[in-house]
Amino acid sequence: MVKIIDKEFVPFITAEAIDSRLQEMGEMISKDFKDDNPIILGVLNGAFMFLSDLAKYIKIPAEISFIKVSSYQGISSTGEVKDLIGLDAKLQGRKVIVVEDIIDTGLSMTHLLKKLKINQPSQISVVTLLFKPEALKHQLKIDYIGFEIPNKFVVGYGLDYDGFGRNLPAIYQLK
Ligand code: 5GP
Ligand code: MG
Ligand code: MG
């Protein structure tokens, strides 16, 4: 059990389970993008740890960059999405792999994909560590999913509760 601010969280996905899933995902991505020199775009802040670990299992030449999009406060989505910042990579004609920590309603990813398409990449693929199928409200194609999880708030491994908990090496679920 971990306490963050006023909430209690219980163990949900261990660091070992995350690592072995990342190894599988890395192998799939390496195979699928073998000759493509893709650009991998991690979505900050949530995906920092996920991409850092996943990248070690991606054994092909790839550019890695980070972008930042939305503000999300407390434990329920405000639906408020900010502009895309930090995009310095040239996407035109390139294969882009977007890496997110979690897809909940799908709103953030839908907005992000719309913005990225303006830069005319030849292909955009979506990778997410966690996916809550019951929460999805937007039509979205997700290419690589680490874990499908129930519609319950989680923290750790990059994911925060009001800014805290990102440093936890495993994933915890609201008690
Ligand atoms: P969406 O736009 O798909 O509803 O939400 C995506 C964003 O909401 C994620 O990038 C993340 O910041 C936040 N989010 C959604 N569900 C959770 C959750 O269970 N835990 C945490 N920490 N953040 C979440
Ligand atoms: Mg995120
Ligand atoms: Mg957050």
Image: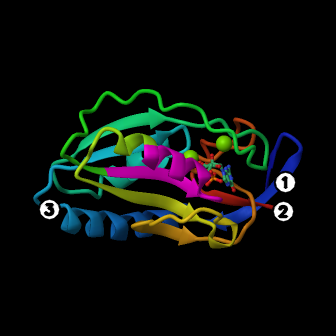
User: Given contact means CB atoms under 8 Å apart, are the residues at marks 3 and 2 in contact?
Assistant: no
Magenta-colored stretch includes residue 15: no
- In the image, which residues are magenta? 97-114
Q: Where is residue 106 in the image (x, y as percent from the top left)?
A: 59, 57
Residue marked by disc 1:
8
Q: Distance between the residues labelled 3 and 2?
A: 42 Å
Residue marked by disc 2:
175
Q: Where is residue 18 in the image (x, y as percent from the top left)?
A: 49, 64
User: Given contact means CB atoms under 8 Å apart, are the residues at marks 1 and 2 in contact?
Assistant: yes
Mark 2 residue crowding within 10 angstroms, few (<14) / some (14–19) / many (20+): some
Q: How far apart are marks 1 and 2 (CA)?
A: 6 Å
Amino acid type at circle 3 is Lys
Q: Distance between the residues labelled 1 and 3?
A: 43 Å
**Which residue occupies the foreground of this view, 45 or 57?**
45
Q: Position of residue 152 (x, y in %)?
A: 75, 64
* Residue 5, quarter of picture: top right
